[in-house]
Image: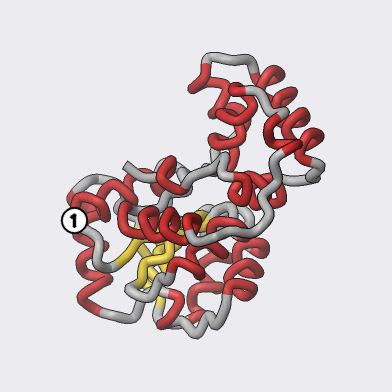
């Protein structure tokens, strides 16, 4: 059972999240922090924790700072829980932070429960509302989209790319798709080669722009 860190200084929010985590038996290991310093201290103690974060209340000013935190704590999972999640900000999160999902404070109770449960399983997830905002943002984009390389991906490679981008490991994907570890790993290498990228972060950004990955894939 993974540890959850509640990085939110609104008492009612923390009480509600704690209630849901314990009621649904998602986790009993729940730590509350009041500021960025305490958050970092607890992540040093619990590097694999799942962080429920309202970035606006923790003086995290932009996506680059969030990306730095994600890079520093490479085993942690992040769920942004806020009422200030613009479509443009969400697009940046989706493309630049591979282990950060999002949950609106305006979400339904069922949506919040689903998001917390998926996060506890190590899945990157976007709730219904944030996913809708992302789809709306994509429709407004008329810039260049990479096509040639993406069109060369096979159906299997596109499916595996979606799974990789959702935060799943090669072993997890192999088990779910009934493939060998080496087959999935081979697909992964081919995907990176065809897209001309060197890591998951670059591959996810590329596939988002190309429309292979839709954030709707990450929510129920």
Q: Give above or below for 110 relative to 158.
A: below
Residue 37 visible in the picture: no
Quadrant (top left, top right, bottom left, bottom right) of the C terminus: top left
Q: How many marks?
A: 1
Disc 1 is placed on an element classified as helix
In-image side of 175 versus 134 (left or right): right
As rendered, which of 130 and 28 lies closer to the eye? 130
Question: What residue is at 40 percent from the left and 64 percent from the top?
Answer: 52
Quadrant (top left, top right, bottom left, bottom right) of the N terminus: top left
Residue 104 visible in the picture: yes
* Quadrant housing residue 97: bottom right
Question: What residue is at 68 percent from the left and 28 percent from the top?
Answer: 153
In-image side of 220 versus 22 (left or right): right
- The residue beneath circle 1 is 109
Which color scheme is applied?
A: secondary structure
In-image side of 160 versus 7 (left or right): right
Question: What residue is at 40 percent from the left and 48 percent from the top?
Answer: 119
As rendered, which of 143 and 122 lies closer to the eye? 143
Q: Give above or below for 50 relative to 123.
A: below
* Quadrant housing residue 172: top right
Tell me residue 159's x, y (percent).
Answer: 56, 29
Tell me residue 3's x, y (percent).
Answer: 42, 55
Question: What residue is at 19 percent from the left and 60 percent from the top?
Answer: 19
Tell me residue 173's x, y (percent).
Answer: 55, 27
Q: Hey, which residue is sitting farthest front in the picture?
A: 142
Q: Residues within 10 Å of mark 1 (few under 14, many from 20)?
A: few
Tell me residue 187's x, y (percent).
Answer: 70, 25
In-image side of 22 versus 83 (left or right): left
């Amino acid at each position: 059972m993974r540890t959850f860190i509640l990085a939110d200084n609104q008492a009612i929010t923390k009480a509600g999240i704690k209630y849901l985590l314990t009621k649904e038996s998602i986790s009993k290991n729940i730590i509350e922090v009041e500021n960025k310093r305490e958050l970092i201290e607890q992540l040093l103690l619990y590097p694999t924790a799942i962080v429920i974060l309202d970035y606006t209340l923790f003086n995290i000013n932009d996506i680059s700072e969030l990306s730095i935190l994600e890079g520093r704590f490479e085993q942690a999972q992040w769920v942004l829980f806020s009422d200030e999640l613009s479509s443009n900000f969400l697009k940046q999160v989706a493309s630049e932070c591979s282990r950060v999902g999002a949950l609106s404070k305006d979400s339904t109770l069922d949506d919040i429960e689903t998001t917390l449960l998926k996060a506890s399983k190590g899945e990157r997830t976007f709730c219904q509302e944030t996913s809708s905002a992302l789809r709306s943002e994509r429709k407004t984009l008329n810039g260049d989209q990479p096509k040639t390389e993406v069109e060369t991906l096979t159906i299997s490679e596109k499916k595996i790319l979606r799974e990789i981008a959702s935060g799943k490991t090669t072993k997890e994907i192999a088990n779910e798709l009934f493939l060998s570890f080496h087959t999935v790993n081979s697909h992964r290498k081919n995907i990176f080669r065809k897209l001309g990228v060197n890591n998951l972060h670059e591959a996810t950004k590329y596939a988002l722009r190309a429309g292979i990955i839709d954030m709707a894939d990450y929510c129920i």
